[in-house]
Image (cartoon, coloured by chain):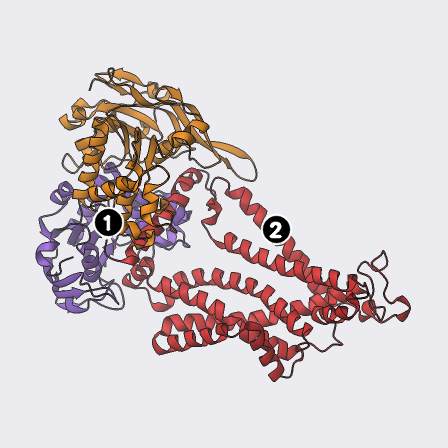
Chain colours: A orange, B red, C purple
Amino acid sequence: MDNESKPVVLSVEDVGVSFRMYAKGLRRTALPVIRSLGLDVCAGEILAVIGSSGSGKSLLAHAILGILPGNAEVSGTIKYNGKTLTSALQKQYRGSEIVLIPQAVDWLDPLMRVGKQVIGTKGSKEEMQRAFARFGLSPETERLYPVQLSGGMARRILISAAIVGEPKLIIADEPTPGLSVDLAKETFLYFRELADRGAGVLLITHDVDLALHFADRIAVLYAGTTMEIAPTRDFLSGADALRHPYSKALFDALPQNGFRPLAGSQPYAGDLPRGCMFAARCGMRTDACFADVPMRSLRGGEVRCIHAT
Amino acid sequence: MYDGRRTGGQADEVNRNQAGIDGARISESHGLRDRGPRGADARTRLLILVLIASAYLLIVFFWGLFMDPEMYATRFADKFLPPGFAHPFGTDFTGRDMFFRSVKGLSTSLVIGAIASAISSVIGLVFGIASAVIGGKFDKFILWCIDCCMGLPHLVLLILISFMLGRGAFGVMAGVALTHWPELTRIVRAEVLQLRSAQYVIASYRMGMSKFRVAKSHIVPHVLPVYLVGLVLLFPHAIMHEASITFLGFGLPPESPAIGVILAESMKHIATGKWWLALFPGLMLLVAVLLFDLIGENLKRLLNPTSGNE
Amino acid sequence: MRLEAHHLDFRYPKTDKWILKDVSLTVGAGERLALVGPSGSGKSTLSALLSGCLAADAGTVLWDGKPLPVKGYCPVQLIRQHPELSVNPRRKMGKILCESWTPDKALLEKMGIEERWMTRWPAELSGGELQRFCIARVLGPRTKFLICDEISTMLDVITQAQIWRLILDVTVQNGLGLIVVTHNPALAKRVCDRAIDLTDINAARP
């Protein structure tokens, strides 16, 4: 994928998120959950962010939108169309140019008819009806309250609400659980369509299969940091085309591939090792892995590993 | 998805995800028990609030209980003194010290409130559990009783019962106890019903646990906090209602030092500018009621293992 | 020994829409069946009926020729999709794990269950971590048949591979039968011997 020619919609540079919290007694400590995370989303591109649960995927989305809880601290810079996102700008763009399709279906207001919520402050009735038709929701759905929806319907409502208007950057946080395979595919096709019309899509998912089908590039997260960013075709062509040992392990663990597990578990926030986060589970580990490992370019992608070739 | 229950379950899960997992991940390595980002702070504050409120109420309770009647004895020489150093709340038409009378009166109210709430809450607990477990006609009957009790104006029912049982402390207590159980019954019943169909309770049965084991390890730990909070929140109602019917003359006899009696007496003198007779005892009652409410609400949050994340 | 379902009908109380109608199915011990079908086709309901967690309106479920026991340990155990709902939020993980048997250290290690999780509350673990407990607690010797209802959707692929490998080991070792409900065709192919689409054997049309 030739990214140089397309404008970068979102760039996340060396972002860290930590939580202030009380350790024993009243002593405050900062717990880093995301560390030196970097990625770009270009216009017309779907970037999938994959990684295990607890790797900080949702927090990344919330950091971009500026909706982290009050005790979170963000370091590094997040730029939208070249401008650094301040909380004022986040507020201005949120819901219009930058939209979130949240993971949890209880983001809907329980006391408001869903039609109204989909229209929101910026959409029109026609747009809502179009979105409903698109996602197989009957027109009567508009008059229902969130409690009357099934899980799959609620999810489609959330997607409709996000795409009403013309968002430039769509952040989808696990948008497909609860949808049937057909609907999930339909949703991803729609993201593809939005991307083709020039929007950037940041797709956070753990469904590697779907990511492989629809994303242009894939960023692999582990323990709160980016391990590898690679064009999707590398994931399709096999473990050898991938760069980071963790990405290779992910590939090998897929049921259609080796279905091979990997011993050990992801380190916990607050307990993060120095140097490479993956070192403890890695077969290529050397002493050098316990020093800082920067992100570097390799074969048309980026990798955070000193041994990758 | 095919059914409302399922959807509810999902929303539930999702809530837990939001409240729990991010916060939990963070707290894990530190082994902080059920504490989210700001949890420790909030929980300590709640606990201190509850302790202060309980201390105040306990002091009033015991002070009044063991008070020497001399402290609020009649001294005609001192009648109608406005609030001052010797008598912080002033004195009444027979020269009794209003401060000590108020403490004694509030203490009496607390005793009656405590006994009435205890009886009421036990009725609520037993009916609630029985209603949910036995179900069928019994459940319908209990629900009908609840509707009856809640359909009548509270105070009217209270006065009726108290009057029928010959007024006095016994009448008031019985009246308050017999009119305050429906709400708690409903809460306990709903809780037990929900638990009985909870996935982990069903799983427990399928793993061969007996009814007794399930009740011990799954039902009681959930119902007990609900019950305790319900009990504390019953207090202010009980006290308020005791004071109200005493004020109206259907409760404690006029010679007893009760807040209701004090307030009723003060009405005769308020027109002549003896404002302190009503103001201070009234305030004390109000503060006590509000404190109980505060304890109950905070207890609710303290007893919830995940509320620390809020 | 085999698990048989004969002409099962089911609808939720106070509704008139049948979820399952005249569903029959037989799975032998040692057999591994994938149960597929679109969402809303009744896969979870059928799983609950087959494990005795729900009672059918008509029809019978037989294990080894006899109806499932109402009391005592059920030889057919169900693991559900949402582990958060399958554990008591007011019990610690250690107690949850050992409710019906005490898994040995080796098994816990293979499952990736860490010792320090035992003193945690369920709200302090992620869905994936909770699910490991829900799986481990029914892998005891009294379980003869396992029904897995979308148990790995919340797990990342590495953990998914780890846990399925282990479940397969245990099923082979103890001669268990297995029904796997999943949306993932690759997983179904990898884990099971055969697949049934529920819409093909269910007379109810959603």
**In this picture, is C28 found above or below C157?**
below
Identify the image quadrant of the N terminus of chain A.
top left
Q: Residue at x 29, y 59 (%)?
A: B203
Task: Answer with the quarter of the image where residue B188 lies.
Answer: bottom left
Element on which disc 1 rests: helix
Query: Viewer-nearest of labels 2 and 1?
Result: 1
Closer to us: B176 or B306: B176
**In this picture, is A69 found above or below C102?**
above
Q: Seen in the image, is B244 located left or right of residue A309?
A: right
Q: Residue at x 31, y 29 (%)?
A: A169
Q: Where does label 2 land, which residue?
A: B49
**In this picture, is C100 found above or below C153?**
below
Identify the image quadrant of the C terminus of chain A.
top left
Question: Decide: marks 2, 1 in contact (CB < 8 A)?
Answer: no
Q: CA distance from mark 2 to mark 1?
A: 52 Å
Whether residue C143 is visible, yes or no, is no
Q: For the view shown, which residue lies furthest in the right direction?
A: B77
Residue A139 — which label? 1
Q: Amino acid at mark 1?
A: Pro
Residue C205 in the image, given as x and y percentages of width and height: 13, 58
